[in-house]
Image (cartoon, rainbow, N blue to C red):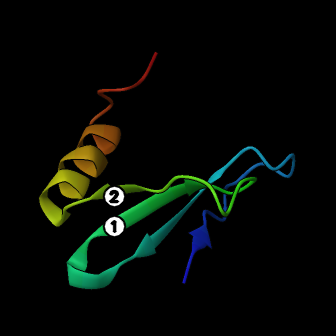
């Protein structure tokens, strides 16, 4: 099941995330649900989320 963040903008500019088979995590553009899906391993996803929480991507 694909989910959007509760903090997503109402203008539709957001991504959706889903748990996939084998523990992988999928990310897609909510405006193009039949488009490409980025697939991450659990370790890759954990590193990304840790970077976001740690401020690595702050401008």
Counting from the top left corner in percent of width and height, residue 45 is at 25, 56
Q: Quadrant of residue 24?
A: bottom left
Residue at 37% over, 26% down: 57
- Mark 2 → mark 1, Cα distance in angstroms: 6 Å
Location of residue 21 by image quarter: bottom left
39 sits to left or right of 29: left
Q: Residue furthest left?
A: 43
Q: Looking at the image, which residue sits at the far top?
A: 59
Number of numbered callouts drawn:
2
Please determine whether, in this image, residue 59 is positioned above or below residue 52: above
Q: Nearer the viewer, residue 26 or 3?
A: 26
Badge 2 vs badge 1, beta-carbon distance below 8 Å: yes
Q: Which of the numbered marks, if any, corresponds to residue 39?
A: 2
Quarter of the image containing the N terminus? Answer: bottom right
Q: Which residue is mark 1?
A: 25
For mark 2, does the 10 Å Cα neighbourhood hold few (<14), some (14 to 19), or many (20 or more) residues?
some
Q: Residues within 10 Å of mark 1 (few under 14, many from 20)?
A: some
> In the rendered image of this protein, does residue 14 appear above or below residue 17?
above
Say whether residue 38 is left or right of residue 41. Answer: right
Residue 51 locus on image (x, y percent): 26, 38
Secondary structure, mark 1, is strand
In the foreground, 8 or 42: 42
The relative height of residue 56 versus residue 30 in the rendered view (above or below) is: above
| Horizontal relation, residue 56 to residue 30: left or right | left
The residue depicted at 33 percent of the width and 30 percent of the height is 55
| Residue 53 x %, y % | 32, 44
Disc 2 is placed on an element classified as: strand
Q: Residue 16 sits in which quadrant?
A: bottom right
Mark 2 and mark 1 lie on one chain; the one further toward the N terminus is: 1
Horizontally, residue 58 falls left or right of residue 12, namely left
């Amino acid at each position: 099941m694909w989910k959007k963040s509760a903090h997503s903008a109402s203008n539709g500019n957001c991504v959706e995330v889903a748990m996939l088979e084998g523990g992988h995590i999928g990310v897609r553009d909510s405006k193009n649900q039949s488009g490409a899906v980025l697939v991450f391993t659990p370790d890759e996803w954990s590193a990304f989320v840790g970077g976001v929480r740690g401020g690595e991507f702050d401008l």
